[in-house]
Amino acid sequence: MEPANKGTWFDYECQAAIEDKNKACRNMQQGYGTRSLTEEYKEHRREVKINHKRKEKEWMNVELENMDLLTLKHECRKFCKEINMTRKQFKPRVHICRNEDGSLISNEQEILNRWVNY
């Protein structure tokens, strides 16, 4: 599995921590929620939360340093672009289209054929 977005704080270390947490959760569910398995899951959950906060803070500090350098170099356009990129949240693209009869199609080739017909 690849990280969600290449230019963000989420990396392979975060992903591995989440996979460990999910494994602990499955163990807890399969072990009928014993105290030791529940505590193990809670510990993994805490570690993931702490790891994500730390990574996000480090990433934000690097981004702020880069923006500071842009202001020192008087590169207003790049600075504004960076500001907007940090303020906007990730929005996944939706690749669906309606067919002639009104049903939704999600296959890429069918969508292209629909646009050709349109």
Image (cartoon, grey):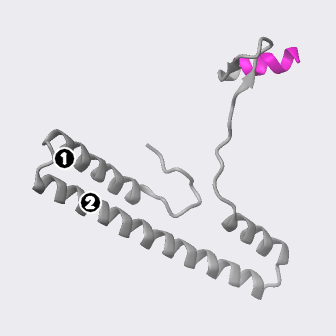
Q: CA distance from mark 2 to mark 1?
A: 12 Å
Q: Quadrant of residue 108?
A: top right
Q: Badge 2: how crowded within 10 Å, few (<14), some, or many (20+)?
A: many
| Vertical side of 108 occupied by 11: above or below | below
The disc label shown at residue 44, or none: 2
- Work out which quarter of the rendered image holds the C terminus and state it: top right
Residue drawn at x 78%, y 16% as measured from the top left: 113
Residue 66: name its quadrant: bottom right
Q: Nearer the viewer, residue 94 or 17?
A: 94
Q: Which residue position holds label 1?
A: 28
Label 2 is placed on what type of residue? His
Q: Does residue 6 appear to the left or right of 115 in the view shown?
A: left
Element at label 1? helix
Q: State which tag comes first along the sequence, 2 or 1.
A: 1
Image point (76%, 88%), residue name: 72
Q: Nearer the viewer, mark 2 or mark 1?
A: 1
The disc placed on residue 40 is none
Residue found farthest to the bottom = 72
Q: Which residues are magenta?
A: 110-118
At x 68%, y 41%, the residue is 93
Seen in the picture, residue 81 relative to 66 is either above or below; the reply is above
Q: Where is residue 107 drawn, in percent x and y?
A: 65, 21
Q: Please, what secondary structure does the residue beneath circle 2 have?
A: helix
